[in-house]
Amino acid sequence: GANSGVFFRTDPSDPVQAGFEIQLLDDRGFRPAKGKLDAKKLNGAFYDCQPPSADPAKPVGQWNEFRLTCLGPMIRVQINGQLVNEFNVDRWDTPGKNPDGSVNKFRTAMKDLPRRGKIGIQNHGHPVWLKQITIRELD
């Protein structure tokens, strides 16, 4: 039932609006406060912007491998070796709007956010365990 995320290229003073987030979520156990869970908020989603193509997560209690690759405007998300999201942030050129015309909660166009910044792990009070975190700079 846990809800978490990985912030990247963000400013710690406002990680939600000043950076990017990939959702980490127990899709099977999480129950939203109201209504159905939006696909753009599922495990591996570019939060509120683009849903994942699949959910290859292992059952709760087993370790999963998460890989986030950022190179210029291109972002790739892999879970357990499977590509679940890939996008070019330059396509998000309008505040509050996704390239498909749907709305998002962001006051700044994603293409205008920094290409460098801090990395952070977010949670909403549920237990989330992480291990063997490796950060490598790409050319």
Image: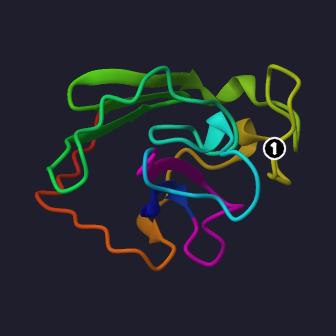
Q: Position of residue 136 (x, y in %)?
A: 22, 45
Look at label 1 and name its amino acid. Answer: Asn
Q: Position of residue 114 (x, y in %)?
A: 62, 49
In the drawing, does residue 116 fall left or right of residue 62? right
Colouring: rainbow
Screen quadrant of the C terminus: top left
In the drawing, does residue 117 fall left or right of residue 130? right
Residue farthest to the left? 132
Question: What residue appears at the point 76 percent right and 59 percent down from the top-left corner?
Answer: 34
The part of the image, by quadrant, that contains residue 92 is top right
**Which secondary structure type mostly characterizes the magenta part of the structure?**
loop
Question: What residue appears at the point 81 percent right and 19 percent down from the top-left corner?
Answer: 100
In this view, the residue in front, 104 or 88, is 104
The part of the image, by quadrant, that contains residue 44 is top left
- Inspect the magenta stretch and tell me whether residue 94 lies in it: no
In the drawing, does residue 4 fall left or right of residue 106? left
Screen quadrant of the N terminus: bottom left
Question: What residue appears at the point 32 percent right and 30 percent down from the top-left corner?
Answer: 78
Question: What residue appears at the point 14 percent right and 50 percent down from the top-left corner?
Answer: 62
The local crowd at label 1, few if under 14, some if 14 to 19, many if 20 or more residues have their Cα within 10 Å, is some
Residue 19, visible in the rendered structure? yes
In the rendered structure, which segment of residues is drawn in magenta? 11-27
Return the residue at label 1.
104
In this view, the residue in front, 101 or 69, is 101
- Inspect the magenta stretch and tell me whether residue 19 lies in it: yes
Q: Secondary structure at mark 1?
A: loop
Above/below status of 86 relative to 113: above
Q: Position of residue 53 (x, y in %)?
A: 49, 20
In this view, the residue in front, 43 or 35, is 35
Q: Position of residue 103 (x, y in %)?
A: 87, 38
